[in-house]
Amino acid sequence: MRRIRLLCPLVVALGVVLPAAASARTTWYVALGDSLARGVQPNAAGVSVMTTAGYVDDLYATERASHPGLRLKKLGCPGETSTSMIKGGICHYAAGSQLAAARSFLRHHHGRIAFLTLDIGANDVDGCLKNGSIDGTCLTAGTKSAGRNVPKIAKEVRAAAGTAPTMVGMTYYDPFLALYVQGANYRTLAVASVSVSGSFNDSLVAGYRKAKFRIADVAKAFKTNAQTSTTAPGLGTVPTNVAQICALTWMCAPAPVGPNIHANATGYTLIARTFEKRLR
């Protein structure tokens, strides 16, 4: 104890400043999911590329202010389906799959996970729009696979991390609303896609809640179910949900950039804010 008493005046006398960061305990934000979890957006040639302007990046930047020592672990995989997240096959993981990699990381850092976000399932059904119509068989199969796999994924992630970390799963916006601006022949399909999207999101929510995940209702934030109309630049008077999908994603962008299902920077910011509210 005497050495400590002697040392403290010496530190002050020498003007030595001990870095505050040295005392900050390292904690982790773990981001899981598909291309949205990697901030994918189209480049000028229309090629979808990973960026640092996704919702994960925005959320991390915001949360660092209240979580000294917070670090980010991105494990998302562009193109990931709920099946490939479990079995692997799209992105390379030393553990074999994104889920296995997540389990390993969460167990290794047990007690130091601040929070986790997850978006998965969209790629199970995004390919079901074919030749200007919705393939019912594809949609049914995709919804079933997501309904079967998402609860398993959420349960295993929760088991690996324990009950303490906050975990948030998200609902999806409906990119097919953008078909509305292509003319009368597509408007019925665009309107019908809303109920399809709602049923799919209900399935995801049920799976997340079984593992005590909170829900970031991105579908609501994008006003997917809005029943109103608005006037939007370049579109005229259109349903509010159509105006939103055009403003927040690349679906209505001219070729070669669009149409692209990914959120733009503004859309990703809104997704981040939706997650942020569920962390409180």
Image: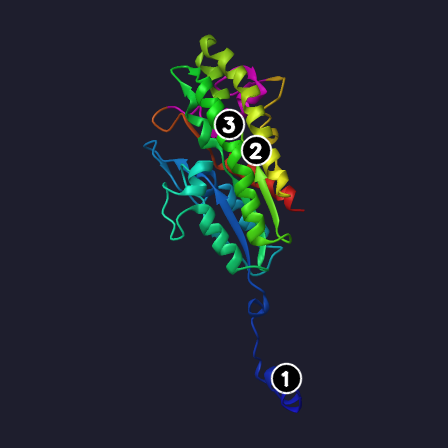
Residue at the spot x=52%, y=55% of the render? 106
The answer to which image quadrant residue 127 occupies is top left
Residue 133 within the magenta-colored segment of the rendering? no
Q: Which residue is mark 3?
A: 143
Q: Residue 93 at what x, y percent from top left?
A: 38, 50
Residue type of the residue flagged with mark 2: Leu
Q: CA distance from mark 1 to mark 2?
A: 56 Å
Q: Find numbered disc 2 in the image and state the secondary structure of the residue it sits on.
A: helix
Q: Nearer the viewer, residue 122 or 268?
A: 122
Q: Which residue is mark 2?
A: 204
Q: Which residue is mark 1?
A: 8
Q: Find numbered disc 1 in the image and state the secondary structure of the residue it sits on.
A: helix
Q: Find numbered disc 3 in the image and state the secondary structure of the residue it sits on.
A: helix
Image height of 138 relative to 110, above or below: above
Q: CA distance from mark 3 to mark 2?
A: 9 Å
Image height of 116 relative to 110, above or below: above
- State which region is magenta: 230-254
How dense is the environment of label 2, judged by Cα within 10 Å: few (below 14), some, or many (20 and up)? many
Please report whichever mark, 1 or 2, sits nearer to the chain's N-terminal start: 1
